Amino acid sequence: MTLRVYGSDGDLATLRFLRWFPRLRRFSIAGLHHLTDLAPLQQLSADVEFLDIGETRTPLDLTPVAAFQGLRQLRIVAHRRGLPDLLHANPALRGLALWRLPVDQVLPVIALPDLRSLALTLGSLTNAEWLTRAPGLRYLALRAVRKLTNLDTVTRLPALQWLWLDALTLDHLPDFAACTALLRVDCTEMRHLRHPASLQGLAAAPQLQQLLVTESRLPIEAFNPFVDHPTLEHVGVGLGTERRNHQARRLLRRTPPPADTDFARTHGLLRVL
């Protein structure tokens, strides 16, 4: 169970209450506006496995958190100082979510060999090659990440099973023929995908089973490459009008994918946000 603390209470922001939770292993700070120092986190057990250092009024120094060296999941929102040391101190990290950060500037040199799940939200990624520092990724979410101009690097992640793309400024997807582990792709609010061939490269994924495309301006013809896909079982579409949705469903003749939580549980995937 995760303990979350938030709000504008000044006494909560001292984190003195943590002395009552000496065995706590999952802790979330998100929206604790007056928090100014993370040193009180050292009251927690050394066995902490999940930390969420979310929104605060001013960015915090993460250096005190580097004392925890057994983290399995970490979420950081906009805090830069001490982040490289924190990640270096936790080489066995399995799940990482970074929000509102220029990722490859804050972390120009970092190796995450055991990372299985990564979510980048807002912020920016100038050099997509940065993603190859986590070659074992099975789940990758890229949501409203600026400066990301192509996804060629993503097609070189050999273990990738689930890809979630949201609000990126890409007008086509690359060739996923080499992604033999890829099972599911979610495309939400990818409004720059408008050409009939925008999804053609994705249809080359040889083991693709589930596809979800919502808040989209794609033409119906963009789904033609999936009609005879040999492994595709489920497709869900949201193309702006019920008429266009009906046309796509009639073309594809497949049911929508199951809930993302069900997919994660079925395939043993850690879904980080």
Image: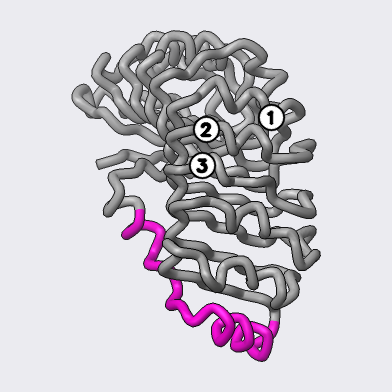
- Relative side of 218 to 141, left or right: right
> Mark 1 highlights which residue?
128
Residue 247, magenta (yes or no): yes
- Relative side of 72 to 112, left or right: left
Q: Secondary structure at mark 3?
A: loop
Q: Residue at x 60, y 58 (%)?
A: 187
Mark 3 vs 2: CB contact within 8 A: yes
Q: Quadrant of residue 5?
A: top left
Looking at marks 2 and 1 on the same chain, the residue that comes earlier in the sequence is marked by: 1
Along the line of sight, the residue nearer the viewer: 7 or 108: 108
Please state the extent of the stretch shown in magenta in the rendering.
241-263
Q: Position of residue 74 (x, y in %)?
A: 43, 29
Residue 208 higher or lower than 40, as above or below: below
Task: Specify few, some or many for label 1: CA neighbours under 10 Å numbering under 14, 14-19, or 20 or more.
Answer: some
Residue 137 higher or lower than 216, as above or below: above
Disc 3 marks which amino acid? Answer: Cys
> Mark 2 highlights which residue?
157
Q: Residue at x 24, y 28 (%)?
A: 24
- Relative side of 251 to 123, left or right: left
Specify the label residue 179 is tagged with.
3
Residue 230, magenta (yes or no): no
Alpha carbon distance from label 3 to label 2: 7 Å
Seen as rendered, the residue at the extreme bottom is 243
The secondary structure that dominates the magenta segment is helix
Alpha carbon distance from label 3 to label 1: 17 Å
Closer to the camera: disc 2 or disc 1?
Answer: 2
Closer to the camera: disc 3 or disc 1?
Answer: 3
Q: Report how many numbered discs are placed on residues in the image.
A: 3
Specify the label residue 61 is tagged with.
none
